[in-house]
Image (cartoon, rainbow, N blue to C red):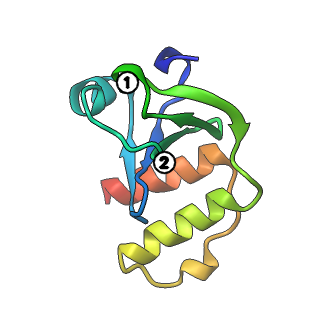
Amino acid sequence: MKRDNINWPAFIKYSGDDELVLVKDDTRWQREFRQATFDADDFLVDSGGRRFTLAGENSAPVSLAQPLADGELDTLLRNHFAALGECCIAKIPALPPAEALRLLCDTEDS
């Protein structure tokens, strides 16, 4: 699957960095990330909960055909908010992917 099949918004998880990078739409992807260089362990997660590798030809996201593992999204979110110094991260409930992305969008906008 190429980027046309990504359910936006999405986020990028860089290897070795707990902060998630929000990508709200394809326009931002094209403007800011299309020519970026990614490590083999970097990945993108879309609002459908699908994981995409980014270290391919032209850094075009390619679906990995495996969803996030149980609890992985929760861990990514908690680590992200902890890296930002947010309090009460333990109170973040388990969220479906679309709601998790909405939470990231809401906190970026505030």
Q: Amino acid at mark 1?
A: Asp
Q: Residue type at mark 2: give it.
A: Asp
Q: Quadrant of the C terminus?
A: bottom left
The number of numbered discs placed on residues in the rendered structure image is 2
Closer to us: 64 or 91: 64
Instruction: Name the element at disc 1.
Output: helix
Above or below for 56 versus 15: above
Residue designated by label 2: 41
Q: Residue at x 39, y 29 (%)?
A: 25
The answer to whether the residue labelled 1 contacts the one labelled 2, judged by CB atoms less than 8 Å apart, is no
Image location (x, y in percent) of residue 40: 45, 42
Q: Residues within 10 Å of mark 2 (few under 14, many from 20)?
A: few
Structural distance between the alpha carbons of marks 1 and 2: 22 Å
Q: Secondary structure at mark 2?
A: loop
Image: 50 above or below 62: below
* Other-residue count near label 1 (Cα within 10 Å), few / some / many at <14 / 14–19 / ≥20: some
Chain-order first, disc 1 or disc 2: 1
Q: Is residue 7 above or below residue 95?
A: above
> Which of these two is toward me, 56 or 6?
56
On the picture, is 61 further left or further right than 29?
right
* Image location (x, y in percent) of residue 4: 49, 15
- Image quadrant where one finds the N terminus: top right
| Residue occupying image coordinates x 58% and y 53% | 100
The residue under the point 64% across, 32% down is: 64
Horizontal side, residue 48 vs residue 17: left or right: right
Q: On the image, numbered disc 1 is attached to which residue?
A: 26
At horizontal 62% and vertical 79% (from top left) the residue drawn is 91
Q: Identify the image quadrant of residue 27.
A: top left
On the image, the x and y values in percent for residue 65 come to: 70, 30
Q: Position of residue 7 (x, y in %)?
A: 55, 28
